[in-house]
Amino acid sequence: MPMNRADLKLYGSLIDAALAAVPKDTDRRVRQFMGKKVKQTLGIDEVNSTLEMGHMANLWAALGYQDAMRYLFEALMVRLGSQEGIRAPDSLDSAMLAWPAAYANLTGYAHLFNRANTPPSSLSDEVDDPIFTNPSDYRQRTMGTPQAPGSSWGFKDVVVPIRFILDDMEIMGIHRLATTNDWGWNRERFNQELELHATNLRQFLSYPATKPHMPVDPHVFIPENFTYFPAQHATDAVPSPEPSRPLPGLEHLPAPIPTGNPLPPGILLNQPDRILPQEAPTPCP
């Protein structure tokens, strides 16, 4: 259904609030990656806006910007309720956000987004290798480690290596909840790799290696017109020619939330009452 004027205004206000919640003293390289047109790239009619949401969610989770993430997820829920935009969010987008939500202790959203999916491509088609635990010679030279940064970090503009890390985190976040993957990783193995990405990203950006404290928040915002998650976007995709193995240990993990069940037991609902559309704060420059 088309997004009505009030929801469109609320969406924009929540994006403004998310950007305003990013601390003013954030490292210039983080600001550089976000870009001067970040509000536009997260706009309702931008083709890649849901992917940009994934970049911001993983970046802000790694840096401990929990408030910014909360507003971002509220904006996503408004969009999910209307399914509006050039590229409306789908089940892969919600799966992509489950890990950063869990890492940031937004446990309600982590549970809500914890849904099995069937990506259109195999993991090996999208990620060459684990860049920190089993890097290729090329990745060792260009990415390196926080203790011995590669050549990509030697430039004033470090958007490329930051985006490479965040791209990996998005893809692994999706495949973490996939029914199969050709690396043979279980969910815990994905969690370990994603946590290493977050820790290394902080250190590359001169933040402490220790994970920032973020209090547990089980609340989620469910818009009035939200009734269900969209059907899986990729269930009819052509199978990858690479062999795919069931995730070992998957049967012991919590069951993902099925399509059509937006409210798992134990989730606490709230409205985004910290701001009103007409009172949205001005994003930091």
Image (cartoon, helix red, strand yellow):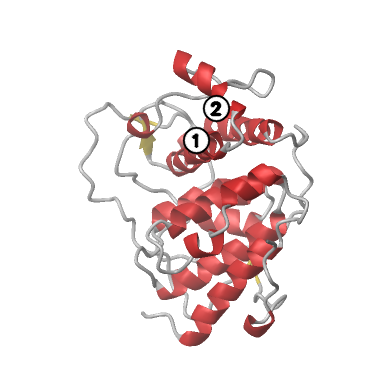
**Depth order, front residue of 164/75:** 164
Residue at (57% x, 35% y) in the render:
194
| Quadrant of the rendering where the N terminus is positioned | bottom left
Hey, what amino acid is under mark 1? Phe
Residue 218 seen by the camera: no
Can you say which quadrant of the picture contains the C terminus?
bottom right
- Judging depth in this view, the residue of 213 and 85 nearest the camera is 85
Residue 131 in percent (x, y) is at 51, 24
> In front: mark 2 or mark 1?
2
Q: Amino acid at mark 2?
A: Ser
| Up/down of 77 relative to 210, above or below | below
Name which residue lies at 49% across and 79% down.
8
Determine whether 129 is above or below 172 in the image.
Answer: above
**Residue at label 2?**
152
Extreme residue toward the front, this view: 156
Q: Residue at x 32, y 32 (%)?
A: 125
* As drawn, 39 above or below 95: below
> Residue 267 falls in which quadrant of the image?
bottom right
Considering every residue shown, the one lying at the far top of the view is: 137
Q: Is residue 244 visible?
A: yes
Q: Residues within 10 Å of mark 2 (few under 14, many from 20)?
A: some
* Residue positioned 53% across, 60% down in the render: 37
As rendered, which of 265 and 200 lies closer to the eye? 200
Task: Verify CB contact (< 8 Å) between mark 2 and mark 1.
Answer: yes
Q: Position of residue 33 (x, y in %)?
A: 58, 46
SS for callout 1: helix
Q: Is residue 250 left or right of residue 202?
A: left
Question: What SS does tag 2 mark?
Answer: helix
Residue linked to disc 1 = 164
Q: Earlier in the sequence, mark 2 or mark 1?
A: 2
The residues bearing labels 2 and 1 have C-alpha atoms spaced at a distance of 10 Å
Percent x, y for residue 128? 40, 26
